[in-house]
Amino acid sequence: MTDIAPPVAFSHLGIYVYDLAKMEDFYTRVLGFIVTDRGIVRGTTPIVFMSRNPEEHHQIVLAGGRTGAPTDRLVNQISLRVESLAALRRIYQMASREREVTDIDPVNHCVTWSVYFRDPEGNRIEVFVDSPWYVRQPLVEKLDLTLSDEEIAARTKARWEKDPTFKPLAQWKREFADKLKAQMAGTAT
């Protein structure tokens, strides 16, 4: 009998960009996205998270540093949400058995617990489950999926609860919804 993958839902798209400031301006000014976080990831790549939905910390991720011809790889990653750490572990195990899947990387972002990997043609996939917390992004730390759900949650909370931006995800969603409403009220005609 073969494993059946748990249900996944499309969440967000990350794209590489040549001019991060220009693209941020376009997505915020023309499409109405709000920047939810920004920073440097993996030491050198500037990154901007944007959303128009208080249920989603980010719907678009702009990653700077794109080089090469416009026909070069544009998609940074395709991100899919699962409902539980158990489902995330199942995806991790299934991907780990595939010979053509590479770069498997379980990551703790505090806001999510994720597994990244590349499909057989090299496209980057992120499968994740939301955690109950928010902290300023980007954060990238190793995730040990051999731990129980309770141990992962306890370690995540202990690691970031002293950060001044740490808060329950529900609180972040309420605050972002208020920010989104204020923006919409300011642009209403």
Image (cartoon, rainbow, N blue to C red):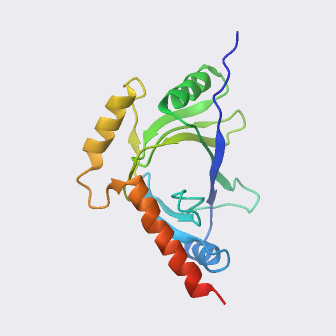
Query: Residue extending furthest left?
Result: 162
| Quarter occupied by the N terminus | top right
Residue 167 visible, this orientation: yes
Taking depth in this image into account, of 136 and 24 the one nearest to the observer is 136
Q: In this view, does 142 lie above or below 183?
A: above
Taking depth in this image into account, of 130 and 93 the one nearest to the observer is 130
Q: Which residue is drawn at 62% across and 80% down?
A: 29
Q: Is residue 68 above or below residue 33?
A: above
Residue 138 visible, this orientation: no
Q: How many marks?
A: 0
Rendering quarter of residue 170: bottom left
Q: In this view, does 173 lie above or below 78?
A: below
Query: Residue extending furthest bottom?
Result: 189
Q: Which residue is drawn at 66% across and 26% down?
A: 5
Taking depth in this image into account, of 113 and 140 the one nearest to the observer is 113
> Residue 40's spot in the image, x, y percent?
43, 60
Q: Which residue is drawn at 67% across and 90% down?
A: 189
Q: Which residue is drawn at 43% across and 44% down?
A: 131
> Residue 188's spot in the image, x, y percent?
63, 86
Q: In screen coordinates, is 167 left or right of 170?
A: left
Query: Residue extending furthest right?
Result: 71
> Residue 144's spot in the image, x, y percent?
39, 30
Q: In this view, does 175 lie above or below 101?
A: below
> Residue 85's spot in the image, x, y percent?
48, 32
Taking depth in this image into account, of 9 and 104 the one nearest to the observer is 9
Q: In screen coordinates, is 17 left or right of 138?
A: right
